[in-house]
Image (cartoon, grey):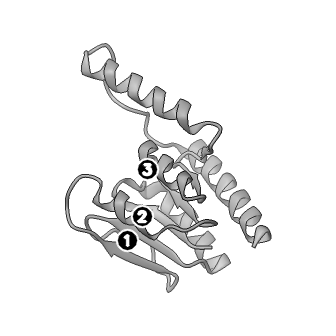
Amino acid sequence: MKLYVDGDAFPNILKPVFIRAVERLQIATFVIANKRVTVGPSKFVTSVVVKAGPDEADNRIVEMVEPGDLVITADIPLADRVLEKNARVIDHRGGEFTAANIKNALAMRELLQELRDTGEVSGGPSALNQKDVHAFANQFDRILTRMRKEQ
């Protein structure tokens, strides 16, 4: 099992929780972004910098991910592509994307984008708070524990 992080938008508030889990479980981790992103000191974390451009980091993650791996991203189209490769995906708030919910998530994303484009809705999701950090930490731990048992 390997861990991949969509580093372009990985929230700083999650980094301490994330790095503690990586260190404790000694998981090979790749942080992929179009610039160097530091999540914390760890010999288990490799930073992969891709060329600038839309979806370059996403494409690299999809290229590298294998069945049984875990990806952390809030990018719903990327989550859909990762699920097609039989890997698991969680977002920054601890939500897990699955085959059962990804199509609804994609449809909601498209609807919200249309509403933003027409000016009916503005802005995006609220900033992460401590409740979100706690939810992420719990879900991250549950999924990692489950995945390690499955191996």
Please tell me how crowded label 3 is: few (under 14), some (14-19), or many (20+) other residues with Cα within 10 Å.
Answer: many
**In the image: residue 110, left or right of residue 69:** left
Whether residue 146 sits left or right of residue 57 in the image: it is right
Hey, what amino acid is under mark 1?
Answer: Thr
Amino acid on which disc 3 is placed: Leu
The residue closer to the viewer here, 2 or 136, is: 2
Q: Could you say where residue 74 lies in the image, as x and y percent from the top left?
A: 46, 47
Which image quadrant is residue 57 in?
bottom left
Q: Residues within 10 Å of mark 2 (few under 14, many from 20)?
A: many
The residue at which mark 1 appears reads as: 38
Find residue 31 and report its horizontal and vertical position in percent.
42, 69
Identify the secondary structure beneath mark 1: loop
Q: Amino acid at mark 2?
A: Ile
In the rendered image, the residue lying farthest to the right is 149
* Mark 3 lies on residue: 78
Q: How many marks?
A: 3
Decide: marks 2, 3 in contact (CB < 8 A)? yes
Q: Nearer the viewer, mark 2 or mark 1?
A: 2
Q: Nearer the viewer, mark 3 or mark 1?
A: 3
**Residue at the (75%, 73%) spot, across then down:** 151
